[in-house]
Image (cartoon, rainbow, N blue to C red):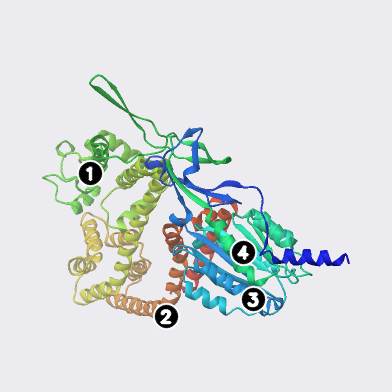
Amino acid sequence: MRRIPLVLLALVLGAFPALAQTGPSEIEIVDINGARYADGGFVTMVLELRNLAEAPDPSQVRITANGETVSELEVLNLRESSVQTGVVLTIDASGSMQGAPLESAKAAAKSFVGEMRPGDRIALVTFADEVLVVSGFTNNVDELNARIDAIEANGETSFNDAVIQSVALFDAGSASDLLANVIVLTDGDDTVSQAAIEEAVAAVQQSEVRVFGVALESPDFNPVPVEQVATAGQGLFLSTPDPELLSTLYDQISREIGNTLVARFVSPISTPGEVEFAVAYQGLSASNVFAVSGYAVTTTTTTGPTTTTTLAPIEGFVAESNSPLELGSLVMIAAAGIGLTLFLFLIILFGREDEDDPGRFAKRLQAYGRRGPASEEKLPFLQRLPLLNRFTAAAEEEVRRRGLLSGMNSTLEQANIPMTPGEAILAMFGLAAVGGVFATIFNGVIIGAVAFGALLLIFLFAVRFTGSRERKKFEQQLPDTLTLMSTSLRAGYSLLQATEAVATEAQNPTAREFGRGIAEARLGVSVSDSLQGIVDRTQSEDFEWAVMAIEIQREVGGNLAEVLQTVADTMRARNRLKGEIRALTAEGRISALVLGSLPFVLFAFLWFSNRDYLLPLIESTFGLIAIGVGLLLMAGGIFWLKKIVDINI
């Protein structure tokens, strides 16, 4: 007889649509965005109100910053705002869900998808023997419904792994800006997960994802794990024994997610530092500390007819302004930088030109003798500037003291740059300093120092690249040059006359170098030494062999024309073989170029398109270590590929 009341009680409880675990009402600041703070203190704040009996009233929200009331406060409901919501629908697809439970779960999920806003994103995850991400984040309703309809029930239950995988979906860069929520539905205990329930709870607690747990109860089902996950994720735990009521539970979760407010306001704190933002709503309160950059504040004080305007100083911030004073300052800075750059170019390119100067080629000959008494010579323009002259001399002396003078001269000679080492150092440091000053003005001291160093490296690379290009041109013209010398010798010319014929008829840089050799020979240097001077300037190994052959022929005798022709034919065959090898190794060289540049290009693309995705790599110690190891491995790989395709002949 006593069993009848118990049965009636069970029937009454089963008649309720669902049992929900609801805690006390609370409010939380889930996000503060101060990206426009420097434009005047504008802040966007996202507030979550939980376990409310009715929809929140935006007019009841009060916000303060360090105890001061904010201004221009505007509070919107989530549906009225532009904040995007992300929801992962995680559905149990194990064998126990076959039939009515799975069909009701599909209907509830499709109903939830139909209520989403165009800007919201939903992902779909199922779990049985293993976890399957059926769909990534999308707002395509038709695609989501089709994927939901395709879910089939079979296998065991991997609830713990599904929770961990669902939470991890928000770590992707495309979902990092979404308001994160997970709805997980199951009807049975976990049976095959690799992770324990403690690991799933820890994963939820370590994330910023709000998790809602829905339990489709049966007599043998223990809903405690689902409740633990929902509690850790500060969401709702809902349960029902009736599959038909799942849509009602999903509607309740949708309303709970919608109890989110987006506030926009102007902060009264204008100085940089940490600010405590506090929010209050009908007896509920929350606070959060946020670091702000500071912004310009204009205060006007009127005493009689006089008006005084004061700008509050801001540390590390350059405010945008249309005032004539600031615009004029920027114009003056730009004009000074451009003027300094032009001044340096004029010094280097035209500094030593005067009316009696026959040209740069003649200036090179001045190293071998004077054209007249010293008292009649005019000092070069650069030497008439004491400060620059001292800097140039000091730089050249430092290069000479370190034993780098010959290498510096050789590099400048190869690149055909008519400057001394001191002048080259002055030019590179001056231009790099101009770029560093501009970078410092607009981006800070650290960026300025980096820009200064980078420009120096770029100038050094440009000089070496120019010299390497001139040397390659010289070596490509060398077979024709030796053939011309051989033909001239067969026609009865002397070696000096043959060299002069090359200087007259060949193309640059061969004509230029042989012309200088002829000038040296006419000033008393032997023909062999003048040709060796060409070797020293061009650093051409091929021409060094030709000069060596000439020296041997002069010592032992023989037909010099035939020797030069043989050397020319040998070099022409070597150049042909080099071209064939270069064609055969083109694929390897392109692969090295692509593989070497791809990480940097991809990094730059992500930096400008999705910077938040890269920030953990740059800001964490492990990420910096990974970058360092990656650069070392890349350097090793590039060196390896270069050794593979670099074949010396």
Q: Earlier in the sequence, mark 4 or mark 1?
A: 4
Nearer the observer, disc 4 or disc 3? 4
- Where disc 2 sits, the SS reads helix
CA distance separating discs 1 and 3: 83 Å
State the CA–CA distance, disc 2 to disc 3.
62 Å
- Distance from disc 1 to disc 2, alpha carbons, whole Å, reads 47 Å
Say whether residue 648 is visible.
no
Instruction: Say which residue appears at 62% left-offset and 77% top-offset.
Output: 103
**Secondary structure at numbered mark 4:** helix
Mark 3 element type: helix
* In this rendering, the label closer to the viewer, 4 or 1: 4
Q: Quadrant of residue 461?
A: bottom left
Q: Earlier in the sequence, mark 1 or mark 2?
A: 1
- In the image, is 256 to the left or to the right of 392? right
Q: Are marks 4 and 1 in contact (CB under 8 Å)?
A: no
Q: What is the spatial separation of the Cα atoms under label 4 and label 3, in whole angstroms?
A: 15 Å
Q: Residues within 10 Å of mark 2 (few under 14, many from 20)?
A: few
Is label 2 or label 4 in front?
A: 4
- Please name the residue that numbered disc 4 is placed on: 249
| Amino acid on which the number 1 mark rests in the picture | Ile
- Left or right: residue 404 compared with residue 193: left
